[in-house]
Image (cartoon, rainbow, N blue to C red):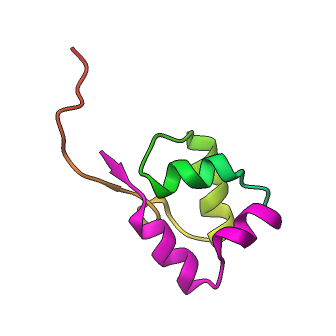
Amino acid sequence: MIKYDKLWQTAKEKGITKYRLHTYYNISKSQLFRLSHNQSVSTNTLDRLCNILDCRLEDIAEHFPDDNTFK
């Protein structure tokens, strides 16, 4: 499972709110909802967030082992 708890911490440290992500950087409300609920998002969205926040992927997402495997 991928969790995005670090995203909100990193954004706060950079002074960027969800409102600013939506209005200034055009991140859709549905993407923000998906991120807030640790649902899947595209790698393009993650790339955009890293560029906006000037950070690495590890600063916004974290992997936790689960039973989601390919069989």
Left/right of residue 61 with respect to residue 13 in the rendered view: left
Picture residue at 72% right of the left edge, 55% below the top: 27
Picture residue at 50% right of the left edge, 71% below the top: 8
User: What secondary structure prevails in the magenta region?
Assistant: helix
Q: Is residue 6 placed above or below 31 in the rendered structure?
A: below
Left/right of residue 15 with respect to residue 70 in the rendered view: right
Outermost residue to the right: 24
Picture residue at 17% right of the left edge, 33% below the top: 67
Number of numbered tags placed on the structure image: 0
Q: Is residue 35 placed above or below 1 in the rendered structure?
A: below
Q: Is residue 4 placed above or below 65 in the rendered structure?
A: below
Q: x and y percent of residue 30 in the render? A: 64, 46
Left/right of residue 41 with respect to residue 67 in the rendered view: right
Q: Is residue 69 magenta?
A: no
Q: Quadrant of the C terminus?
A: top left
Q: x and y percent of residue 1 in the render? A: 29, 44
Q: Is residue 17 magenta?
A: yes
Outermost residue to the top: 71
Q: Which contiguous range is marked in magenta?
A: 1-24
Seen from the viewer's position, the closer of residues 10 and 55 is 10
Q: x and y percent of residue 32 in the render? A: 60, 55
The part of the image, by quadrant, that contains residue 24 is bottom right
Picture residue at 50% right of the left edge, 64% below the top: 56
Q: x and y percent of residue 25 in the render? A: 78, 62
